[in-house]
Image: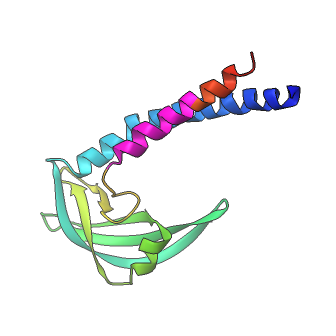
């Protein structure tokens, strides 16, 4: 039983720290960027899939697509987005996709079906980090 408590303590600290890190990521980076992509300063346009590829990172491949689009002024831009495997499989070279970009920063853009361009998921951004923090704290304190 003593060894189990030691593991609970260590994993509790790790889960607590991961929850804090995830909360900071969502609050400082992910939600503000996605809110800008869907806010008043954004524009929606049509893009074209130029190519698809995979990139092995860790245990799972990253499913990527290069997308080109023109901004309101006619400037050409290219982005690379990350996709869920099922969404990536449905893409075809030269197919049309919906792209959102920030008018003043057209290179800040994403296909709305990509992982980069999905609307902010507040449940994921709030509930998951809080659950990790609370469970991790409970495991950490179970040492006593």
Q: Residue at x 30, y 63 (%)?
A: 112
In this view, the residue farthest toward the right is 2
Task: Find residue 71 and report its image quarter.
Answer: bottom left
Residue 21 seen = no
What kind of colouring is applied to the model shown?
rainbow
Q: Position of residue 34 (x, y in %)?
A: 30, 48
In magenta, the rendered stretch is 120-134
**Magenta-drawn stretch, dominant element (helix, strand or loop):** helix
The quadrant the C terminus occupies is top right
Residue 14's x, y, as percent? 66, 33
**Residue at horizontal 38 percent and vertical 84 percent from the top:** 93
Query: Does the segment drawn in magenta span residue 126?
Result: yes
Q: Residue furthest front?
A: 1
Residue 28 visible to an observer of this rendering: yes
Tag count: 0
Residue 99 appears in which quarter of the rendering?
A: bottom left
The N terminus lies in quadrant? top right
- Residue 16 as seen in the image, left or right of residue 86: right
Quarter of the image for residue 137 reads: top right
Q: Is residue 72 above or below residue 120?
A: below
Residue at 55% from the left image edge and 30% from the top image edge: 133
Say whether residue 80 is magenta: no
Residue beneath the point at 46% across and 73% down: 86
Q: Where's residue 82, x and y in %? A: 45, 63
Left or right: where 39 falls relative to 112: left
Closer to the camera in the image, 110 or 103: 110
Residue 102 % position (x, y): 22, 52
């Amino acid at each position: 039983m003593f060894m189990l408590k030691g593991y609970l303590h260590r994993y509790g600290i790790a889960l607590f720290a991961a929850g804090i890190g995830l909360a900071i990521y969502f609050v400082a980076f992910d939600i503000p960027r996605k809110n800008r992509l869907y806010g008043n300063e954004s524009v929606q346009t049509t893009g074209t899939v130029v190519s698809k590829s995979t990139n092995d990172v860790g245990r799972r491949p990253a499913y990527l697509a290069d997308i080109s689009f023109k901004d309101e002024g006619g400037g050409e831009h290219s982005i690379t987005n990350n996709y869920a495997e099922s969404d990536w499989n449905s893409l075809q070279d030269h197919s049309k996709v919906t792209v959102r970009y920030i008018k003043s920063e057209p290179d800040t853009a994403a296909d709305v079906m990509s992982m980069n361009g999905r609307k902010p998921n507040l449940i994921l951004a709030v509930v998951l980090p809080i659950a990790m923090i609370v469970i991790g704290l409970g495991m950490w304190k179970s040492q006593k």
